[in-house]
Amino acid sequence: MTSAVTDVQLNELTEFANDLADAARLVITRHFRSDLSVSHKASDMPRGQPVTVADRDAEQAMRGMIQAHYPDHGIVGEEHGTTNADADWQWVLDPIDGTRAFIAGMPMFGTLIGLTYQGAPVLGIIDQPVLGERFVGHAGQATFNNAPMATRACASLNEAVFATTDIAMFATPAARAAYEAIRRRALVTQFGGNCYAYAMLAAGAIDMVIEADLKPWDVTALVPVIEAAGGVITGWDGSPAHTASHVLACGDRALYGEVAPLLKNAV
């Protein structure tokens, strides 16, 4: 944590971030497994990126609270853009990370709430609304539903549970070759987790998550959660994760040391 941020400030902001997650839960659970209309935003996918009223309304609920309580803070949201881009404090919001899973009625999605100060992530929440699970990280403290959590020891790729949302993320020949090298050696490979896979890494159930084509709202909240739980998360090239589109997260630093060289030149 940057020395310019006090414990008192961070505790106050963490309490407020939990209120944001509560507000998003109310919206999301109301729409889960309902007769939703799905539209598509422009993207490089053949039919675009799916979005629902739950995505938009959950983010709007959080934005309204931030603007009322901290009008000088900035907001970066997947659905409604950026406000106060030059502010020291920036809330980075993804109301539903894993909209496809949400649409399919599967609980492999979550709300991501990140907070940065002068560009550095200082607070993160991963909230799974329908399971009632919340993962919080800040100032070296990581909790799962208010109980301490930590990553688990796994020093070898041969013993690792490896997760990624979609093999299509490994789109280039170099990325696909790196993926195949890792998959062949990993103990278990799991698909489709979205942000929930990172939550399970922080909670000690998954050892490694590798993904690509991510945006700031996909990553910023993950950084404080994983680091506070004892894990490591960076770009494939070792750059700060919250500025990277290709991300490697490991629960054990020894595992990170084994896997990172396999990805370094795969971007």
Image (cartoon, grey):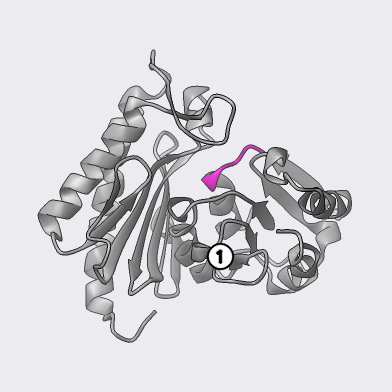
Front-lying residue, 144 or 193: 193
Tell me if residue 103 comes above or below residue 259 in the rendering: above
Front-lying residue, 154 or 208: 208
Residue 148, how many percent across, how many down?
47, 64
Tell me if residue 33 comes above or below residue 259 in the rendering: above
Residue 81, how many percent across, how many down?
31, 47
244 with respect to 166 (left or right): left
Residue lying at the far top in this picture: please name it.
35
Front-lying residue, 26 or 238: 238
Residue 82, how many percent across, how many down?
29, 52
146 with respect to 219 (left or right): left
Q: Residue visible at 82% across and 61% down? A: 157
The quadrant of the image that shows the N terminus is: bottom left
Count residues near mark 1 (Cα–Cα under 10 Å), then give few for <14, some for 14-19, many for 20+.
Answer: many
Q: Does the magenta stretch include residue 192?
A: yes
Which amino acid lies under the numbered mark 1 shown in the image of this protein? Ala
Q: Does the magenta stretch include residue 216?
A: no
Secondary structure of residue under mark 1: loop
What secondary structure is the magenta-colored segment mainly? loop
Is any part of residue 117 visible from this angle? yes
Front-lying residue, 52 or 32: 52
Q: Residue visible at 40% across and 24% down? A: 32
Residue 253, how many percent across, how many down?
69, 73
Q: Provide the residue designation for mark 1.
A: 150
The quadrant of the image that shows the C terminus is: bottom right
Which of the 4 image quadrants contains residue 135?
A: bottom left
Q: Magenta span covers which residues?
A: 191-195
Residue lying at the far bottom in this picture: please name it.
3
Q: Residue visible at 31% across and 25% down? A: 30
Is any part of residue 26 visible from this angle? no
250 with respect to 101 (left or right): right
